[in-house]
Amino acid sequence: MKTAAHIDNINDHSLESAAESLKVLGHPDRLRIIGFLNKEGEAPVHSIEDYLGLSQPHTSTHLSCLRRVGLLNAERRGKEVWYSISDERSLGVLRCMAQKN
């Protein structure tokens, strides 16, 4: 059986990077951000705050974590920062975990 990526061929750096991304995705609010941006395509910080129902500092912390590991893009537009998904593998993780056995 062929798979898109062979686990045997993953180097240590790739494993560490994957582990860091999975750690960041291990928070429900961050998964909600990924789901929201998947639905919206892109959104400014205030829309993400409203969706999550969290304060600006808490939302910004989550967005920073997701950006740090390369899962989100940020683009300044005037006074606002807009976010979008930069690594769609996060969607695959979310879909995989949401499936029932």
Image: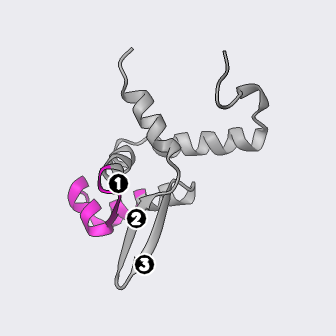
- Helix, strand or loop status at disc 2: strand
Q: Position of residue 15 (x, y in %)?
A: 70, 38
Q: Position of residue 78 (x, y in %)?
A: 36, 85
Nearer-N-terminus badge (2/1): 1
Say left or right for 3 vs 73.
right
- Would residue 53 be seen by someone viewing this image from the given angle? no
Task: Name the residue at 35% across, 18% down.
Answer: 100
The amino acid sitting under disc 1 is: Leu
- Asked whether 40 or 60 is in front, the reply is 40
Q: CA distance from mark 2 to mark 1?
A: 8 Å
Report the magenta residues as a range: 39-62
- Asked whether 61 or 92 is in front, the reply is 92
The amino acid sitting under disc 2 is: Tyr
Q: Determine contact: label 3, label 2, CB under 8 Å.
A: no
| Residue pointed to by mark 2 | 83
- Helix, strand or loop status at disc 1: helix
| Residue pointed to by mark 1 | 37
| Residue pointed to by mark 3 | 76
